[in-house]
Image (spheres, rainbow, N blue to C red):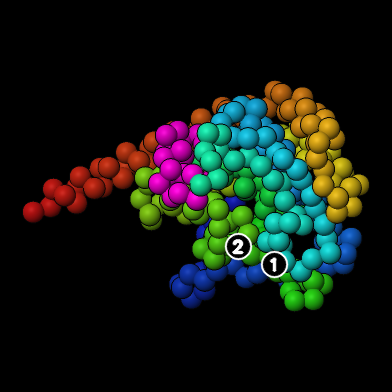
Amino acid sequence: MEERKVDCDSMKIGGIEVPNPPITKSINHEGMEKELAFHEAGHFVFSCMMTKYLPVFTPIDYAITCSEITDLNNDERNVVHGNAPIGLTDDDLKNPGKLRKFYIDDNKRIIVKVFTSFAGVATYPEFIESVDRFVGIPNGNGDALTYYDFKTAYSLRFADFNNIKRWIKYINIPSYKETIFVCKLLEGTRRMMKIQAVRDSIIYIHRRLLKNKCNRVEGIELAKLIVEVQRLTNKVPYMAIVKEYEQIIEDFEKEHEKYVRGINAVP
């Protein structure tokens, strides 16, 4: 497939920067079901790779997708559940200090979490329609979806972008470079999605989620799917790509340190 970068820039009209316009389209039950299943299949496949190559998160507990909804943020009806930090209790997960320490101890933990979160919203341009729009927000009747560009979705914290924005705050990079860095992570996610083994795995899980018709995939069936995805993606250079972005974080942090030293040196 043709390599293309995410459009992280807004349009300029009369020299003034404005957001790329959202795209609204009508959607029926079958279309909604297809999109949601791709979204969760993306999370599923990247979660399997994440826990295999960086085993500091719990495996997936269950997965489910269901189209009879008007709220895409309903975690009970559309979710790949699990992947909690190993060694942290439920109380620890509610403690901002302990959660922050878990992530800042190793930048790779943040990177794989962001990759896995982006793997949901990135399925729209990769599998459904080749446009730089990532989040479909339903109207009140559930018969239309409005898709937003990266900058708008990230700034308004739509869907998975809410967690992504929270995790990025754990990285010590200049605030004015935050959007640039997150865009690079989105590009990294999409780059992995173009690898044939990853695409095949997402399509495979997509079909299985549709087959389950609003029922949870769990237990032995879930275990078989995880093993199959890990087999299919066995040769994907997942950690090599993660390492590239870890270096980007280090470069941004060094740049930030120089900036702070320069500010402090001003009399």
Answer with mark 1 or mark 2, whichever residue precedes in sequence.
Answer: 1
Q: Quadrant location of the N terminus?
A: top right
Does 163 appear in magenta?
Answer: no
Image point 70% across, 56% down: which residue? 75
Does 100 appear in magenta?
Answer: yes
Observer-nearest of 47 and 239? 47
Look at the numbered disc 1 and give the secondary structure of its residue.
Answer: strand
Left or right side of 85 for 201: right
Report x, y in % for residue 193: 70, 40
Q: What residue is pinned by disc 2? A: 158
Measured Cα–Cα span from mark 1 to mark 2 = 8 Å
In the image, which disc is placed on residue 137? Answer: 1
Image point 60% across, 62% down: which residue? 158
Look at the numbered disc 2 and give the secondary structure of its residue.
Answer: loop
Left or right side of 206 for 237: left
Q: Which residues are magenta?
A: 92-109
Residue 239 drawn above or below residue 218 = above
Residue 187 drawn above or below residue 136 = above
Quarter of image, res 248: top left
The main secondary structure of the magenta stretch is helix
Name which residue type carries label 1.
Ile
Image point 79% across, 31% down: which residue? 223
Observer-nearest of 151 and 114? 114
Number of callouts in the render? 2
Name which residue type carries label 2.
Phe
Q: Is residue 228 visible?
A: yes
Image point 55% across, 58% down: which residue? 162
Residues under numbered marks 1 and 2 in contact, where contact means CB atoms less than 8 Å apart: yes
Residue 11 drawn above or below residue 45 = below
Report x, y in % for residue 62: 75, 43
